[in-house]
Image (tube, helix red, strand yellow):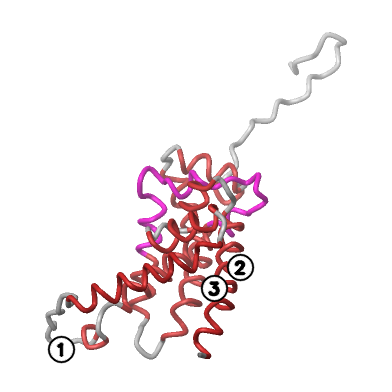
Amino acid sequence: MAARNLYGWPAMPVLACRALPPKDWTDSELLRRTLRNETRAWNELVRRFRSLIFRCVTKVLGRYDSVLSSADADEVYGEVMMTLVRDRMRKLRLYDPRRGTKLSSWIGMISTNVAYDYLRGTARRPILDRIDGVPDIEHETDSPLDGILSGERRAHLNAMLEDYSDKDRAFVSLYYAQGLDAEEVAEEMKISVKTVYSKKHKLLARLQSTLAPMMAA
C-alpha cells in the first residue's frame, strides 16, 4: 500500500541526493578540496588545468625553440606541479578570489613565472652544456675585477634610486636584489599581484628614461 501524508494524499517519492562528480565542481569547490589533500580533487585540478599550464609554458619557451626542445617543456611542467604542492600548497593558498582573479588565471600566472625562472636558470648555463655528448666545462669563479664592477654597479644603482620613494626602493630590493617572485612580493608589500607587475613595468620605464641620457652620452 502506497504511503500517504497527513492529508491522505500519496506521498511524493524522496529523491536521493547524489554528489556531483569532480568535473562538475566549481573552481572554489575544487580548490577547497585540493587544499584538504583529497586525491580526487588533485587529479581533477591536474586534468582541468593541464592544457592551460602547457600553453603558458610553451608560449614562454617557444621564443627560444632554437636551443630548447619539448623535453624542456615537460621539465617545466613538472616544476609547475612541484611548485603547486611545495610548502603545503602555499601558492594555491595565496589565491584570493576577492581580488577578481580566476583560479585559471592564477595557475596560468604561476606557470608563466616558473617558465621564466627556468629560462633564467638556463641562461646561466653555457649552450654547450645543453648538447648531448659534450663534456661539462668547469665554470670559472668571478675574478676580483668582476667583484669591483659588481660593487660599482650596485653603488650606481643606489644613487639612481635616491629620488625614488621608499616603497619603490623596497620593491626593487625585494624583486630584483632578493629575487622574490611576484606572489611573494605581493605578500610582503601587502599589494595585489597585478599591482606588482604594474609597478614593475612603471619602474622599468622610469629607469630606462633615467638611463637614456647617460647611454647617449
143 left or right, relative to 66? left
Tell me which residue sits at (47%, 64%) in the image: 111
Image quadrant in which the N terminus is located: top right
| Label 2 SS | helix
The foreground one among 21 and 9 is 21
Distance between the alpha carbons at the discs numbered 2 and 3: 9 Å
Magenta stretch prevailing secondary structure: helix
Check residue 134 in the rendering and tell me which mark sits there, or answer none. Answer: 1
Residue 19 position within the rendered picture, expressed as x and y whole percent measured from the top left: 59, 37
- Specify few, some or many for label 2: CA neighbours under 10 Å numbering under 14, 14-19, or 20 or more: few
Which callout, 2 or 3, points to the residue nearer the camera?
3
- The answer to whether 67 appears left or right of 2 in the picture is left
Residue sitting farthest toward the top: 6
- For badge 3, the amino acid type reads Leu
Q: Secondary structure at mark 1?
A: loop
Q: Report which residue position mark 3 lands on.
A: 207
In front: label 2 or label 1: 2
Spatial CA distance of label 3 from label 1 is 40 Å
For badge 2, the amino acid type reads Lys
Q: Give the x, y percent position of residue 212.
A: 55, 83
